Image (spheres, coloured by chain):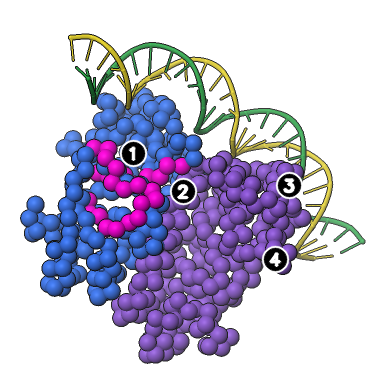
Chain colours: A blue, B purple, C green, D yellow
DNA sequence: CTACTTTTGTGCTCTAAAACATAATTATAG
DNA sequence: CTATAATTATGTTTTAGAGCACAAAAGTAG
């Protein structure tokens, strides 16, 4: 990957910078590849780099009580992640892993902090991004605690379409998740994810072929998601 | 309240500013009083001011499906709130109300935005605050979805002590919540809050006298909260 | 003081979802 | 290719917690 290709991808971080600042950043970043299911960072680790997902798919998750895992959010290209803990001066409270082979660009956080101090537009980018994410987190708390299983699964399916899009047929989700990941995303047990998914298929809301999920009746899915 | 007293209170916003910037802010802020249970803003409202709670207690909450309410976070003096939606360029996704008579200082967000653009320390204050809040939201999501009722209630009681402190006896919570608010804070029905609370009393973890709650065995409460 | 509303407390019932059990199918490794 | 593990599928049981009913207590208003 050339520096040019990369600077295309990391636009939001890159654009606000002066030539000098870009030179500094260009000298310091590294690119790292992760295999399917490889862990990127763990809960309790000390954050050192901001990460930008160049290609692939990444989950941010948290292991809770009794071996259950909650997927907190999912990252798609070209999003930034892994910086919250550093700004809060904490260790990571979540973990991150790659769903699929992923390429990640890493910038040392101390450089980013320096650039933020010099460059107000960059500061504002982070303020906005954090604000958006906090709003999503608040919404999600209520969805996950109050909606019923069907509502939560419908929401998850629609979210996956929104985030990662569909294949050429316009309806097959581009992300292939295991039933377990789908369960961890929508706060239910794996067996309930399997059961509810096949109920949705029986009701002709979706079709399933292994991990391929095709959304057939989005309107009704939306309704199910909404009423909970 | 004199400007001096106020500038004491709103330190985090005030300190980073230059004389000129302080003058601007001093000209523009307003003070507003809210009665017990009065609504401060609603979901769907357009945000215009950042608020700083000078005295009193405020809840940020969200009404979900089927008439259930979730308390998302609680504000104590002297904390800032109500700014997230503006930064994200959204309407409020939550509502806010006063638990008790509260005094709130309001600054127009367009002034704050201007000050942020000029003053990098102020930008960094918001980056840090948002980062901390996002971490709390992530933790909370997992607690609320995975812990059992007893764990969630124990967590809520400990949180209330942490946030609002205790009275002179060193163990009575300074905040007097209705059972319903306690339920909405810990994601359960009112009857389960009542029941679980009186179980805790029977087990000598707490004593209850109306809305006065005294924490007796904090260690065990912590254990109950931890194991879920 | 009396009437009315809201909050708290307790018992009982019901149900959504977890837990468990067991196949069948599909990957993965040796 | 075979053995082993992981994932998916389905049926059954169990249970945590919601829902409902009702009474007592405490606020609030007229």
Foreground pick, B165 / A44? A44
User: What is the chain identity of the residue bearing mark 3?
Assistant: B
Q: Is residue B26 above or below residue D17?
A: below
Residue bearing the label numbered 2 = B141
**From mark 2 to mark 1, how far is it between C-alphas?**
19 Å
Q: Are marks 3 and 4 on the same chain?
A: yes
- Percent x, y of residue B66: 54, 45
In terms of sequence position, does the residue under pointer 2 or pointer 4 come before the other? 2
Asked if the residue at tag 4 contacts the one at tag 2, i.e. Cβ–Cβ closer than 8 Å, the answer is no
Q: Is residue A20 left or right of residue B114?
A: left
Disc 2 residue crowd, few under 14, some 14–19, many 20+, Cα 10 Å = many
Residue A37's image quarter? Answer: top left
Residue A204's image quarter? Answer: top left
Q: Is residue B115 above or below residue A203?
A: below
- Looking at the rendered structure, the secondary structure element under dot 4 is loop
- Which label sits on residue A157? 1
Tell which tag, 3 or 2, sits nearer the viewer: 3
Q: Are marks 2 and 1 on the same chain?
A: no
User: What is the chain identity of the residue bearing mark 1?
Assistant: A
**From mark 3 to mark 4, how far is it between C-alphas?**
19 Å
Residue bearing the label numbered 4 = B167
- Which label sits on residue B37? none
Residue at 59%, 74% (x, y): give it.
B55
Residue bearing the label numbered 3 = B204
Residue at 56%, 67% (x, y): give it.
B76
The region drawn magenta spans: A36-64
Q: Is residue A120 left or right of residue B199?
A: left
- Looking at the rendered structure, the secondary structure element under dot 3 is loop
**From mark 4 to mark 1, how far is it between C-alphas?**
49 Å
Asked if the residue at tag 3 contacts the one at tag 1, i.e. Cβ–Cβ closer than 8 Å, the answer is no
**From mark 1 to mark 3, how far is it between C-alphas?**
46 Å
- Percent x, y of residue A147: 48, 41
């Amino acid at each position: 990957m050339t520096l040019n290709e990369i600077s295309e991808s990391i636009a939001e971080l890159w654009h606000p910078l002066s030539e000098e600042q870009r030179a500094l950043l260009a000298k310091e970043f590294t690119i790292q590849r992760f295999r399917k299911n490889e862990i990127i960072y763990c809960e309790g680790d000390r954050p050192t780099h901001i990460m930008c997902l160049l290609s692939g798919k990444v989950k941010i998750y948290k292991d809770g009580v009794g071996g259950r895992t909650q997927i907190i959010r999912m990252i798609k290209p070209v999003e930034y992640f892994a910086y919250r803990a550093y700004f809060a001066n904490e260790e990571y409270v979540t973990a991150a892993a790659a769903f699929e082979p992923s390429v990640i660009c890493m910038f040392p956080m101390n450089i980013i902090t320096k650039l933020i101090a010099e460059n107000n537009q960059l500061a504002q980018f982070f303020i906005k991004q954090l604000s958006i994410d906090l709003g999503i987190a608040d919404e999600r708390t209520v969805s996950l605690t109050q909606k019923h299983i069907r509502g939560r699964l419908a929401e998850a399916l629609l979210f996956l379409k929104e985030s990662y899009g569909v294949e050429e047929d316009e309806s097959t989700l581009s992300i292939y998740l295991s039933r377990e990941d789908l369960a961890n995303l929508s706060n239910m047990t794996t067996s309930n994810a399997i059961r509810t998914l096949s109920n949705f298929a029986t009701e002709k809301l979706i079709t399933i072929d292994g991990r391929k999920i095709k959304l057939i009746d989005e309107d009704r899915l939306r309704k199910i998601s909404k009423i909970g």
